[in-house]
Amino acid sequence: MSEPTKSEGEISCKELSAEEAVQFADRLVEKGEVGQAIECYLSVADRYELPPADICLRLARCYMRLDDPAAALDWATRVVDAGQDYGVWQAAALIATKAARRLGSAHFRQARKLAVLSSFTTESWVPLLQLAALRLGILLDVYQCAYGQYRQEVLNPESSLYKFAPEMVLIAVDTRDLGIPDFVQDSVAVVDQEVERWGGYWQRILEELSATILQFTFVVPETAPFGHFGAKLQGSRQRVIQALNLRLGELAGPKVALIDCERLASLVGKLRWYSPRYWHLAKMAVSPEAQPLLARHTAAVIAAQLGLSRKCLVLDLDNTLWGGVIGEDGLSGIRLGQGPEGEAFVEFQEYLRSLKERGILLAVCSKNNEADAREPFEKHPEMRLRLSDFVMFVANWKPKAENLREIARELNIGLDSLVFVDDSPAERRAVRKLLPEVDVVPLPEDPCFYVRALSDYLLFEPVSFTQEDSRRTELYRARAQLSAARRGAESLEEFYASLRMKATIGPFDDFHLPRVAQLVGKTNQFNLTTRRHSLAQLEAFAQDPNCVHFYVRLRDCFADHGLVGVMIAFAKDGVLDIDTWLMSCRVIGRTVEATMLAELCRCAVERGCHTITGTYIPTSKNGIVRDIYAQFGFELISETQGTTRWRYDLAGRGPIENRFIEVEHVFGAGNDSRAASTANAA
Amino acid sequence: MTVEQRLQQMLRELLDDDTVELGDDTVAQDVPGWDSYVHINLMYRIEQELGVPLPGNKIFEFKNFGELKRYVIEHLSARRTELS
């Protein structure tokens, strides 16, 4: 296609194929004709019951450019219904969260503060969760703990978690973090211990906060070291994890909701749920392709907790509850019970009945003569649903939108409590347009897949199931169990001690310099000055007699974390000034920072320095260390545009210490070997 | 759309910033917001949408945008040759 000219600008997009129209509109956007482009995209979107995700995204972006955040948000959140593509979700999430910030909390049904405590990186997933929540009218203000920090956050009453004061706390910890080996000797004790630990965390959070807890269940890994034998082997990893999930389900009282990741992983297949690549590369415990699914489900559980679950399912009749048209085919002509199609409708009715039995209201909304519509319920032997299963039965020839309003009014519930199920795309489309508050389930053509389509609709998520009295009994039972669990909860000090951490500290040498340079080049969070020294500069520092430089390696009872910390400081006139101080995010919150300062104090004393000074230069990523100097007793000397200078009076205060990490020193063997190899080369 | 435009478009979407312009010398640090998470998401999209594999740590090894672009182009043309 050629560039749009004035005359082409008048082309009606309706006459172009969808693909051509999109290309045409794309070029209008490039030319800055955003309004025209929107009209063209809308004409494409109108051709689908659910517009494709890329069209929704383009519309959202255009509306953002026109400074219409409400429309931008609407289109960005439609991506949620249009598929589960991770890349598109990411892009939509960016727009939706920006638009939502602009609109403010008053625009939404609910606004909540959510803390995410995790053992893996959640930075890429949280925007998807926010997107899925916005789709349900929920604005989430999210605090994410640093990767792997959940224990410290829960156990330390002064932690950022408690300062944030969230109304919901999501514990997103994955199975790997449990460190359960392929086989455990005393599996009962191991499960007991884990149940006590998690129960203890829940209890601790509920004591400090008036919050609801959301906890991921643990996913049995896709690998089975004992093969099928593991299913009957007491103490196999799979059985321990299954037992733990069961016990957590028993322990979870009304303030704790589980998000059943084990089920979701099975649903998509564990090979797709978890990708070893993304784990090793980015510490994502859930593969990108499964993240939209997890986001949708988590948002649905949050909605349920906020009382936003839907109450009433409104059903069409012909070709929805049975095959054929009762008014034309007659009682003996409709397909129900016999043959593959008839069986599928029976299965669907049974599924609906089970929804009804757990508290979902059923209503009928059908274009039929009322007597015809009632006949199968009264006379057909294969009907599973009875007239008494419905709270409302509306069969007439009025538009369905009108009938839906009537149903909501009669039942005295909002339109936003209704879910509409109809086999006719035209009826569904009309309801979507006229009553956007009503959720519409996109039924597939084949009735065999009706049950799945409805079970993939997530807003029937209940928060409780029992009668008020038995619920009360359960409440007391859970409370009793929790207080037992609390006795087993650890303190932060005990946690640090239990890690049995050992640090190896040494000056930069040839062997370690490449990793040091890598950390200097990419560390964003725990990095006081974010100075990106090159490898050559670092080599020069290593040769500078006034430079104090060391790296820290850390290992604990679980793993060797490798080289995780770098310190560079310069001595001058009795003052040791910190040029660079950084730590890999994988060891934040384990007191390594104290060990690094302790080492620096030791070096200062060795060189006869009486004072240590340091600088904090703020960036968008390093807020986590803004107060770190203050925490260790440094005094603030100056502040200019957020950059702060700090001084530690070593002579007066004495050296900083850390009793939780044992230190081993190595001395720059690498530099000597380089000297040797240089000699050889010469 | 050329490979270069496509990659630029992906990055614009990942940063929600239509002003991003990429040259051969561009490195991630030059572009506000282009952090390691964006980098991983870019890798995912290149693999999924262009079908170009970026095994292991590859995505972190390119010196600049030009190197990444050339790698993608080479892979796409190699595949075309295979098919024909």
Image (cartoon, coloured by chain):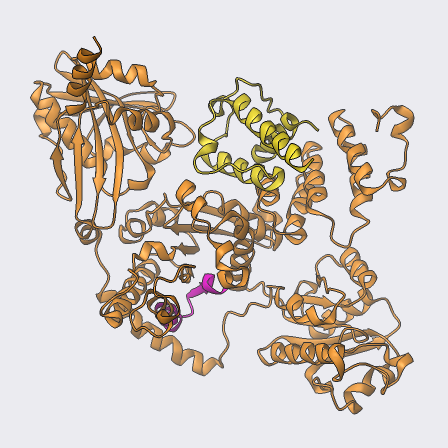
Chain colours: A orange, B yellow
Q: Is residue A178 above or below residue A506?
A: below
How many callouts does the rendering have? Answer: 0
- Residue under the image location 21 percent in, 43 percent down: A555
Give whichever of A574, A426 is nearer the camera: A426
Q: Position of residue A326 (x, y in %)?
A: 86, 80
**Quadrant of the image occupied by residue A436:** bottom right
Q: Is residue A279 above or below residue A597?
A: below
Q: Is residue B73 left or right of residue B58?
A: right
- Residue under the image location 39 percent in, 43 percent down: A280
Q: Is residue A658 left or right of residue B56?
A: left
Q: Which residues are magenta?
A: A244-263
Q: Is residue A361 left or right of residue A279?
A: right
Q: Is residue A96 above or below residue A533?
A: below
- Residue under the image location 62 percent in, 52 percent down: A135
Q: Position of residue A185 (x, y in %)?
A: 22, 68
Is residue A168 rendered magenta in the image? Answer: no
Q: Position of residue A410 (x, y in %)?
A: 73, 74
| The C terminus of chain A: image quadrant | top left
**Quadrant of the image occupied by residue A541:** top left
- Residue under the image location 85 percent in, 66 percent down: A399
| The N terminus of chain A: image quadrant | top right
Q: Position of residue A441 (x, y in %)?
A: 70, 63
Q: Is residue A655 above or below residue A53?
A: above
Can the viewer see residue A409 in this picture? no
**Quadrant of the image occupied by residue A76:** top right
Is residue A245 rendered magenta in the image? Answer: yes
Can the viewer see residue A47 in this picture? yes
